[in-house]
Amino acid sequence: MNWKSEISAARDRIAGYAQVTPVMESNIPGYPVELKLEHIQHTGSFKARGAFNTLLSSDVPAAGVVAASGGNHGAAAAYAAQTLGYPAKIFVPELAGPSKIALIRQTGADLSVVSGEYANALTAAQEHEATTGAMQIHAYDAPATVAGQGTCFAEWDVQGLQADTVLVAVGGGGLIAGALAWFGGARKVVAVEPETSCALNAALRAGEPVDVSVSGIAANALGARRIGEICFELAQGMSSVLVSDDAIAAAQLALWRAHRILVEPAGATALAALTSGAYRPEPGERVAVLVCGANIAPDPFAG
Amino acid sequence: MNWKSEISAARDRIAGYAQVTPVMESNIPGYPVELKLEHIQHTGSFKARGAFNTLLSSDVPAAGVVAASGGNHGAAAAYAAQTLGYPAKIFVPELAGPSKIALIRQTGADLSVVSGEYANALTAAQEHEATTGAMQIHAYDAPATVAGQGTCFAEWDVQGLQADTVLVAVGGGGLIAGALAWFGGARKVVAVEPETSCALNAALRAGEPVDVSVSGIAANALGARRIGEICFELAQGMSSVLVSDDAIAAAQLALWRAHRILVEPAGATALAALTSGAYRPEPGERVAVLVCGANIAPDPFAG
């Protein structure tokens, strides 16, 4: 696949539907780091990019679309479907939590909350797809999803990204696959995962995608049981680091204290690699962090 | 005073101390509006610009600095003093609220909470200045403060501001004085005040600064009893609109829902003029809104 061309096409396709998100320089780790505030994206995460790209590049059947999600992808798929006038059926696990569930309900999508984790929601979504003929929008392991997420990095290049190294949080791997696909070796990409939900790190160690158990404070965004095949293929030989839940919480607090940027734990996970020292830049190495999700629970305006 | 030159000098002076804040385009009012996310500034408001400019352009006495504030200016003055190694004494009224009081305490400043409103804190600060010889950093009615706040708009021009019209919230008038001083008629500036704290609007109607009563949800940021003389002089003939507390709260919620931007009521006041229709752009008129403050209470990480 010619990823550069796929991502460029996706960028043209979703222009006017996805939000162009701002960039800034921060000094949170004690040295300069470029941030892209992708949590400002519609529905509070980068997921809107992949959802719009999928719907705008497909013939959507009368049965509409279906998605399984830890929460953010479901909200994005529901929002994109609503914007484009398609019916949407969304499956999330209970651990999606009240903020994400409320967000999906606001779009008017038909929402089912299933017990267990993300993988259980995916099974339910696949059954719905088989029964109804609805089109599945995969949360991370589909080319249109990956190309959509890759637009985030294409956009950042246009905005003047300087960094040698870009740190990206990983769940199922759609976002970091987009980064690897776009940069194609022109910049180093570092994968950051919670110790308690590390499907990519485990796959790189095992030499193949393997099932992992998922838990911890970022599980409702990064809690994929197995890394996507597309990501795994692109990720060969890449740098992968793990961070603790405490390190994630500290980075989340630092973003609020320093910049009044309020994000969910997943949104602070990539930064946590710098603030905790899990990733230490070489002298002169310029670093950047994608801030990827803001759907904190409880929602500050809930209730 | 040659304001353009004062503001350009201030911009050079505070470079590396003040945060360069990001800009973006939003569609919240149903049409495009440029936003500058100045609430991302150190201590959560634009006030850090004026505080750094004042300290960096002055011979600070051994007694250090003193400031009176509804909260945000006090936090900024305390932060700037801490950064530059000066002792700071800050007076705030009780209505500053727990978030702003905690923020000032974190800097290590000597804080006194006085009863009443901002004007009472100012009286106490003036007594402290007279007794100790500490240098007063006025919250809004001093040339170095106004020039510092003006850097916000000089920076926005460099970042590619397109708008014909820039909407700015007004309390004592330091920020909007900086806007008027920088743009000097090159762009239209619109003053937005809460109906319940409208010192500039009242002054423009009366033809001179007059005392107003202050209340409402933005009073701990915009609750100046009387508009500053510098602002009043620059504001002759300008557009001034008022918004209700309900309109401010709706704009605050819209910023969170659309962009996960969490701000205090004052930070959403300028946007409220658009979302409420208090200011209606002419066909083809491009508008911009400065998002000025984020110190919401309760702090989402308090307790």
Image (cartoon, coloured by chain):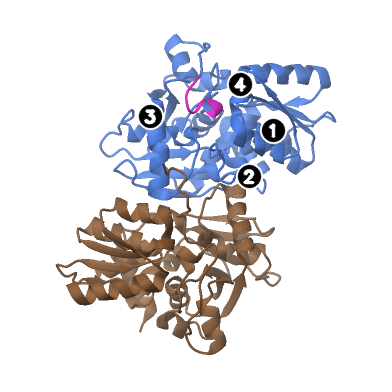
Chain colours: A brown, B blue
Instruction: Tell me the residue that label 2 is attached to.
Output: B18
Residue at x 79%, y 36% (from the top left corner): B86
Is B124 on the left or on the right of A138, as rendered? right
Position of residue B273 relative to residue A48, above or below, is above
* Residue B96 shown left or right of residue A141 in the figure: right
Question: Is residue B163 or residue A290 the one in the foreground?
Answer: A290
Give the residue at mark 1.
B54
Tell me which chain the residue with mark 3 is part of: B
Residue B174 placed where, x, y %?
A: 56, 28
Residue under label 3? B246
The answer to whether dots 1 and 2 both sit on one chain is yes
On the image, the x and y values in percent for residue B287 come to: 37, 39
Label 3 to label 1: alpha-carbon separation? 36 Å
**Badge 4 is on which residue?**
B118
Quarter of the view holding residue A4: bottom left
Of labels 4 and 2, earlier in sequence is: 2
Of B57 and A242, the residue lying toward us: A242
Chain identifier of the residue bearing label 4 in the image = B
- Mark 3 is surrounded, within 10 Å at the Cα level, by few (under 14), some (14 to 19) or many (20 or more) other residues, namely some
Dot 3 or dot 2: first in sequence order is 2
Label 1 CA crowd tier, 10 Å (few <14, some 14–19, many 20+): many
